[in-house]
Image (cartoon, rainbow, N blue to C red):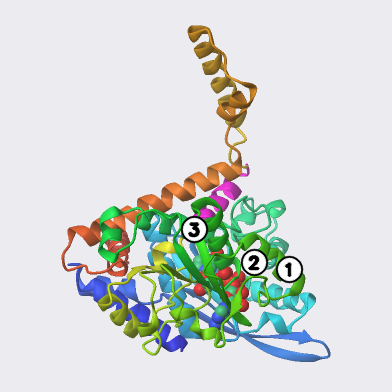
Amino acid sequence: MAHKFYETVQKNFDKAAALTDHPKGLLLQIRECNSVYQMRFPVKIGNHYEVIEAYRVQHSQHRQPTKGGIRYSEMVDQKEVMALASLMTYKCAIVDVPFGGAKGGVKINPRKYNVDQLQNITRRYTVELIKKGFIGPSVDVPAPDYGTGPREMAWILDTYLTFSRGEIDAVGCVTGKPVNQNGIRGRTEATGRGVYYGVREAVSQKDDMAKIGLEPGMAGKRIVVQGFGNVGSYSAQISQEEGDALIVGIAEYDGTIYNPAGINIDKLLKFRKKTGSIVGFPGTEILNDKNDWVGLDCDILIPAALENQITVENAHKIKARIIAEAANGPITAGAEEILIKKGVIIIPDMYLNAGGVTVSYFEWLKNLSHMRFGRMEKRFNENTYGKIIKTVERLTDRSVTDRERRVITRGAEEIDLVRSGLEETMITAFHSIRDIHKRRKKVQDLRSAAFICALNKVASDYIALGVFP
Ligand code: NAD
């Protein structure tokens, strides 16, 4: 299957590349992965040794460092990591994050190991990366992906610090770290929040919505989410709380729950924390076949689990008018053809889930500057706003209430700046893609437009850099 994922990425690349006039050789250079590091290392598990298979792939070094998450999954193989690394190059280009693309993968099921064993695997993997120069704040900077999170990033950081005495920017060697370990506020929610901003922007386009028979606006849109992990749960929660969307279905490993009147995501998260599952959440129905999430009645389907979920076998069941790719590669190339014919709008992964790498970029900048965002200007701004209010009060002979004063004079904290930077990034990138789609008749879908947007930026870098020697 992972083989299919890489093929899909390459096929989609070729489809879009044919619509550009970049030289063939240049396109080939962009398309291929530059460095593939496959490794095997032993880890002591209980009283025996296990040999672990793992990867780090750097797809393109046109900008450095390269950047991309680390995945822990039994399905990891070389082709899967290559596909994900390739997407990272395009993703960074689309959202103007000045990094090349990379990705890491460790072929394990993290549920089968205890915390100490996971720590040993993570630390040993990091050492392998250090030994071959595949990690460092100016070389290659990992982040979380499927099966990993801030905890693993803290172990990677600590291992890197152990081997990098005197390197002043060492904490920038990995992003997605816990906030108290040089992380940034808003990183954990970033991919899901980016999904929300991207979908909100897409459904705000009156002409696009008219074409698919939907009212513009996020409020009341019926959403189904597959995968209730980091990306899926934040996408659902923020769409509900800030966008007034109706989350009607959630699909997970152990079952798919459905309620056409809407599921309260906050309560569902608490319920799962207590019971360990989403199944049995009061007020919801359980589907007989958990894989039937694909055909649930909704306006927007958000696959947020893994690749190759919507295939030629199930694409005809889809009722949604919009598929928002929060996961990487959830739609196979064959399924995409069917969906485009059905007139479904696909908001592509390489744009839609770029919120994670965008905030990772902010975290890396914070690490290099050794200071949190907002520290220098927050009080200054608050004092200035206070003076403006006083002047307005003097000129008008009227005064604002204490509550109004507090709201108006509030200076931005780190979390406000991160969210604002992310919102700006997602909106700007959406329009750069949509403009290509609208302007060029031959560009028939948003994915091709996103690819063209990325290709033009990466190609101009390669042209400017020239070929060495
Ligand atoms: P995660 O491990 O936090 O969550 C994934 C969830 O999907 C898990 O709860 C898992 O049980 C569920 N799942 C797996 N297979 C499923 C299936 N067949 N049906 C239903 N549920 C299933 O992972 P994540 O970080 O949320 O990543 C999800 C996707 O988003 C991946 O494709 C990843 O590459 C992509 N992504 C993640 C980030 C990030 O910042 N974490 C950034 C960009 C893209």
Contact? badges 3 and 1 (CB < 8 Å) = no
Residue at position x 48%, y 55% in the image: 358
- The answer to whether mark 2 is within 8 Å of ligand 1 is yes
* Viewer-side residue, 216 vs 327: 216
Q: Is residue 234 visible?
A: yes
Q: Which mark is residue 149?
A: 2
Answer left or right for 63 relative to 410. Answer: left
The magenta stretch is: 356-371
Q: Nearer the viewer, mark 2 or mark 3?
A: 3
Looking at the image, do the residues carrying marks 2 and 3 touch, with CB atoms under 8 Å apart? Answer: no
At 61% from the left and 21% from the top, the residue drawn is 401
State which image quarter holds ligand 1.
bottom right
The x and y percentages for residue 367 are 60, 49
Viewer-proximal residue among 14 and 233: 233
Asked where in the image residue 18 lies, by quadrant, the reply is: bottom left
Query: Which residue in the structure is indicated by mark 1?
Result: 273
Which secondary structure, mark 1?
helix
Q: Give whichever of discs 1 and 2 has the lower sequence position.
A: 2
x, y percent for residue 383:
59, 21
Give the main secondary structure, helix, strand or loop, of the magenta stretch: helix
Marker disc for residue 245: 3
Q: Position of residue 330 (x, y in %)?
A: 44, 77
When the figure is inspected, residue 341 is found, relative to residue 156, above or below; the finding is: below
Mark 3: give few (<14), some (14-19) or many (20+) Cα within 10 Å.
many
* x then y, percent, for residue 427: 39, 51
**Mark 2 / mark 3, whichever is N-terminal:** 2
Which of discs 1 and 2 lies nearer the camera? The answer is 1
Does residue 401 appear to the left or right of 205 in the view shown? right
Please give the name of the residue rendered at 52% of the width and 11% of the height, measured from the top-left corner: 391
**For the C terminus, which image quadrant?**
bottom left
